[in-house]
Image: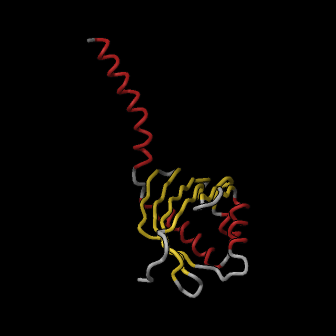
């Protein structure tokens, strides 16, 4: 009986140590952190609308990574800048809006789950999708560390 109890307690300690870090990151961050992350989203969207892909690259960590649908990983701020610069070469910039936010994390690491809508420069709906972003706090700044997105498939309507 004592052997069973020792094994049960040992197993419980192992499980608790495995689960507690997950629970810590699954908590909702303070509203001030959510506001800061939304401000970073706005900075990204504003730079995208201006076609300022250098500014977009500066929003990522040194080894920030785009995990694009159907393509290779784009790693590093310079490569991210190049990805957007070449992808939009000769085109008027699009606009993007983000909504339906979910935030998980703490004052050092935040995961955002949200929806996105991309419109052409003249307002025509190009895509609806969803994304997961991971932000890291570096000094006093939040930086994008991982950026993964996909679209909801062919656009059916433009019901704003």
Residue 73 visible in the current orientation: yes
Seen in the picture, residue 120 relative to 114 is either above or below; the reply is below
At x 68%, y 54%, the residue is 62
Query: Relative to the observer, which residue lies in front, 156 or 121?
Result: 156
Residue 143 visible in the current orientation: no
Say which quarter of the image contains residue 92.
bottom right
Find residue 68 and report its horizontal and vertical position in percent.
60, 61
Query: Relative to the observer, which residue lies in front, 92 or 25?
Result: 92
Query: Quick one: quadrant of the N terminus?
Result: top left
Name of the residue lying farthest toward the bottom: 122
Find residue 123 and report its horizontal and vertical position in percent.
54, 86
Seen in the picture, residue 158 relative to 141 is either above or below; the reply is below
At x 47%, y 50%, the residue is 106
At x 63%, y 63%, the residue is 59
Say which quarter of the image contains residue 5.
top left
Seen in the picture, residue 136 relative to 84 is either above or below; the reply is above
Name of the residue lying farthest toward the left: 1
Q: How is the image coloured?
A: secondary structure
Query: Quick one: quadrant of the C terminus?
Result: bottom left
Say which quarter of the image contains residue 147.
bottom right
**Residue 72 placement, left or right of 152:** right
At x 57%, y 53%, the residue is 136
Find residue 127 and report its horizontal and vertical position in percent.
51, 75
Q: How many marks?
A: 0
Find residue 60 and report its horizontal and vertical position in percent.
64, 59
**Residue 127 placement, left or right of 28:** right
């Amino acid at each position: 009986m004592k052997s069973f109890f020792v094994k049960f307690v040992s197993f419980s300690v192992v499980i608790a140590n495995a689960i507690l870090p997950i629970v810590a990151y699954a908590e909702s961050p303070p509203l001030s952190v959510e506001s800061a992350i939304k401000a970073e989203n706005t900075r990204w969207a504003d730079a995208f609308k201006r076609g300022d892909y250098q500014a977009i690259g500066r929003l990522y960590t040194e080894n920030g990574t785009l995990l694009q649908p159907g393509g290779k990983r784009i790693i590093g701020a310079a490569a991210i800048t190049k990805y957007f610069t070449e992808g939009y070469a000769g085109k008027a910039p699009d606009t993007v809006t983000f909504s339906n936010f979910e935030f998980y994390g703490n004052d050092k690491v935040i995961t955002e789950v949200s929806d996105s809508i991309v419109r052409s420069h003249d307002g025509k709906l190009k895509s609806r999708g969803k994304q997961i972003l991971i932000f890291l706090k570096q000094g006093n700044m939040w930086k994008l560390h991982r950026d993964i997105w996909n679209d909801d498939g062919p656009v059916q309507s433009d019901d704003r």
